[in-house]
């Protein structure tokens, strides 16, 4: 089976890519492929950061690399935390602390609508770039529900599933998620 390197050190993302691509590719992380360290996300858009990660890892290893840059956009916070979702409450990334800050910043908010966004980029050693975007709409709950998934999942109530990602099965989340949608759109382009 053809190997596919995913330019991430996020175990939650890697698990989802393995679930969604496992029948087509042997999905391996950049660390497993021999890439040492991390890529600084200095871009201001999901696309810029996804390109940066895929390009850096592809060039270092000489193979095609897939990267996802994603985040949560909350309407009443003007789209924050957006590209800063992983480091919302500071670095290093602490998901529980990020969720606590989000709830704090949304105290009393009536409009709790939010969306997850994912931009996926495939960078090939030839320099060819293929990219796709996916989104999923929902609401931010007032307290956490379940502990499936990662990041903000246990606060995100999906309109499509009519349940929180924190209690959804992996299959349910992947079927409607921003990452699932971006990945399926990308595969159609290949
Ligand atoms: P980055 O793409 O490495 O910048 O990190 C994305 C961040 O957005 C993660 O650390 C999570 O906080 C959040 N995020 C992205 N996708 C998801 C998801 O599917 N569920 C929950 N949180 C997510």
Image (cartoon, rainbow, N blue to C red):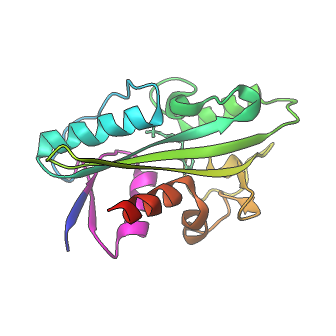
> Can you see residue 108?
yes
Judge whether residue 13 is colored magenta: yes
**Quarter of the image with the N terminus in it:** bottom left
Is 175 in the magenta? no
Quadrant of the frame with the C terminus: bottom left
Answer with the quarter of the image where residue 147 lies: bottom right
Asked where in the image residue 15 lies, by quadrant, the reply is bottom left
Whether residue 39 is situated above or below residue 7 in the rendered picture: above
The number of numbered badges drawn on the structure is 0
Q: Where on the picture, by quarter, is residue 170?
A: bottom right
Q: Position of residue 154 (x, y in %)?
A: 67, 51
- Taking the spot 34% from the left edge, 76% from the top edge, the residue there is 23
Residue 79 in the image, given as x and y percentages of width and height = 65, 30
Q: Image check: 23 left or right of 36?
A: right
Q: Position of residue 186 (x, y in %)?
A: 40, 58
Name which residue lies at 69% across and 58% down: 146
Q: What segment carries the magenta color?
A: 5-31
Query: Extreme left residue here?
Result: 62
């Amino acid at each position: 089976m053809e190997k596919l390197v995913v330019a991430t050190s996020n175990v939650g993302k890697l698990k989802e890519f393995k679930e969604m691509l496992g029948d087509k590719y042997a999905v391996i992380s950049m660390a497993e492929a021999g890439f040492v360290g991390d890529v600084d996300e200095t871009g201001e858009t999901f696309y810029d950061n996804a390109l940066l990660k895929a390009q850096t890892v592809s060039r270092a290893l000489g193979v095609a690399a897939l990267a996802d840059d994603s985040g949560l956009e909350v309407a009443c916070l003007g789209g924050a935390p957006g590209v800063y979702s992983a480091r919302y409450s500071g670095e290093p990334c602490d998901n529980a602390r990020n969720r606590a800050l989000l709830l704090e910043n949304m105290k009393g908010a009536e409009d709790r609508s939010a969306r997850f966004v994912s931009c996926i980029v495939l960078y090939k050693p030839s320099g060819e770039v293929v990219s796709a975007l996916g989104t999923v709409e929902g609401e931010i709950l007032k307290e956490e529900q379940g502990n499936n998934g990662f990041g903000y999942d246990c606060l995100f109530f999906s309109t499509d599933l009519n349940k929180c990602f924190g209690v959804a099965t992996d299959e349910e989340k992947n079927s409607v998620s921003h990452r699932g949608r971006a990945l399926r759109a990308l595969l159609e382009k290949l």
